[in-house]
Image (cartoon, rainbow, N blue to C red):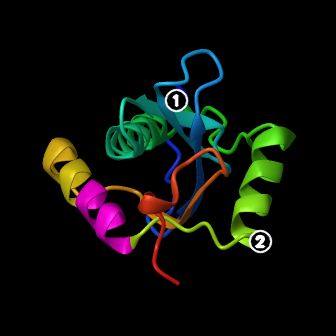
Amino acid sequence: STPKVHLPDSMVYRVCIYKSEDEPSLYVAHCLELDLTGVGDCIESALTELLENIDTQRDVCEQTGAQFFVPAPEKVWRMYQAAVKAGRRIGDELSERVMAQAYRRLGHQPPAIESIVASSQIPDEFLAMS
């Protein structure tokens, strides 16, 4: 039988939000460390789906011993770095709403997100006030 792997609870993730190339009305929340995404018709739903996907991936990897860390493509890292440099951080209020929603849906503490930034395609109204 495959040995169970225990991943530390304290891991934090970085996320970049951008518009879907295939469907510009949709938002994509992309986790840099895991190359997982959440997609939704608003930033909130994309982020909530991403948190659920991280949680599911974590469970699968702990059960099967499969590789957990799979970095996102270089293009996404570049987008993230440009957004960080430009100070395009998502507002705390939106982040807190997403964490509360994910908590309700998962029934336990959702994965911790260290920073959520938005590409230049995302309207400034979603950004934190500097």
Magenta segment, prevailing SS (helix, strand or loop):
helix
Residue at 15% of width from left, 49% of height from top? 107
- The amino acid type found where label 1 is placed reads Thr
Label 2 vs label 1: CA separation? 38 Å
Residue at 68% of width from left, 45% of height from top? 69
Front-most of residues 76 and 67: 76
Residue underneath mark 1: 64
| Residue 68 seen in the figure | yes
Number of callouts: 2
Residue underneath mark 2: 85
Q: Position of residue 3 (x, y in %)?
A: 54, 37
Q: Is residue 80 magenta?
A: no
Task: Select label 2 or label 1 by which is in front.
Answer: 2
Q: In the image, is residue 21 above or below residue 76?
A: above
Label 2 crowd (10 A; few <14 / some 14-19 / many >=20): few
Q: Position of residue 7 (x, y in %)?
A: 52, 55
Label 1 crowd (10 A; few <14 / some 14-19 / many >=20): some
**What's the magenta region?**
92-99
Q: In which quarter of the image is residue 96?
A: bottom left
- The amino acid type found where label 2 is placed reads Lys
